Amino acid sequence: MPVIELQDVSRLYGFGDATTLALDEVNLTIEKGEFVAVMGPSGCGKSTLMNIIGLLDHPSHGSYKLYDRYVDRLRPSQAAKARRDTIGFIFQSFNLLPKLTVLENVALPLVYKGIKPVKRLKLASNMLERVGMQNREYFFPSQLSGGQVQCAAIARALVNDPNLLIADEPTGNLDSAGSRLVMELMSELHKMGNTIIFVTHNPELTRYATRVVYMRDGTIVHDEKKSLGEVAQTARRMMYTLPVASEEDDLAGVSTLMKALPAKPTKSRQKAAKKTTTKGTKTTRRKARR
Ligand code: ADP
């Protein structure tokens, strides 16, 4: 059974001359148990798509069925209930409350369900154990590494036991160790039967996915099913046909696929560009899209 069915979904922002078409008649079906990576340049509509799928926003046109139920016209309170019962949302910025302990943060969504305090903390503690964070229960977010904070955010997203996890650039603010921690945790959740959709700029992280959806200008331009453990073919091709901008960009985890080269070339970039030209490799430069 499909978990998500989007049909001709468009999302417009603004009015008149200032109208932006963030999504343009998107059709997407995601089955139970899929682990989907969404890629595309900045501004192509990835977050808008995640917000609509996560019931944080609604389409201007088109229909959205979540677990076989039309949800594109729900009232805010109905959307909040559907979200609470079925969806865990993880953002790029971790959004933990700094004055609460990790345990209290994870227990927070259960307050809105009316669960008693002792039970809340027990459920939160179980969830932290599941994500390998039980020994950090009484820490404050500021005392954790970025990867650990994101794992706590994942525990919080999962405490209501949703079957669908949506993550908008969950590793965007993490170093490579933190990214691995988070991706391996999501991979475990996938093995347990959860459906996961995540946005990434990093072609390497497509290894964890079973499917990669590529977006451009508000539409899906390519949709690729793949085996776990491999980098998606299209992502790999783009990785090796575009020049690496610089060593620093590489270290910062900036993807050569999704980030355009800045207008002002640095010395190292000029050198890299020269090298590629002498080798006769075909290179493509994209105009910066912001
Ligand atoms: P991505 O996540 O791929 O970077 P977004 O979904 O954030 O892209 O944005 C898609 C387009 O919609 C962009 O042109 C962006 O400027 C525009 N957009 C997104 N949110 C809003 C908003 N709240 N108001 C106006 N325009 C928006």
Image (cartoon, rainbow, N blue to C red):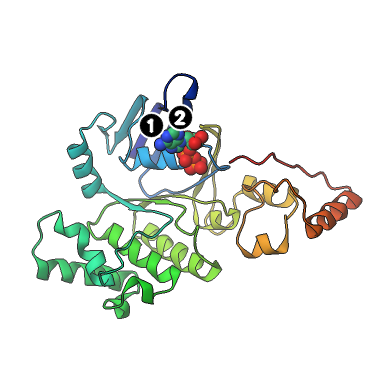
Vertical position of residue 205 compared to residue 139: above or below: above
- For label 1, the residue is 6
Q: How many marks?
A: 2
Query: Residue 75 in the image: x percent, y percent?
Result: 20, 33
Closest to the observer: 217 or 236?
217
Vertical position of residue 82 compared to residue 246: above or below: above
Circle 1: element type = strand
Residue type, numbered disc 1: Leu
Q: Within 8 Å of ligand 1, the CB of disc 1? A: no
Which residue lies at the image location 19% right of the left edge and 67% below the top edge?
123
Query: Residue 164 in the image: x percent, y percent?
Result: 32, 49
- For label 2, the residue is 26
Residue type, numbered disc 2: Val
Vertical position of residue 6 compared to residue 163: above or below: above
Q: Are marks 2 and 1 in contact (CB under 8 Å)?
A: yes
Query: Residue 93 in the image: x percent, y percent?
Result: 41, 57
Which residue lies at the image location 59% right of the left edge and 50% below the top edge?
232
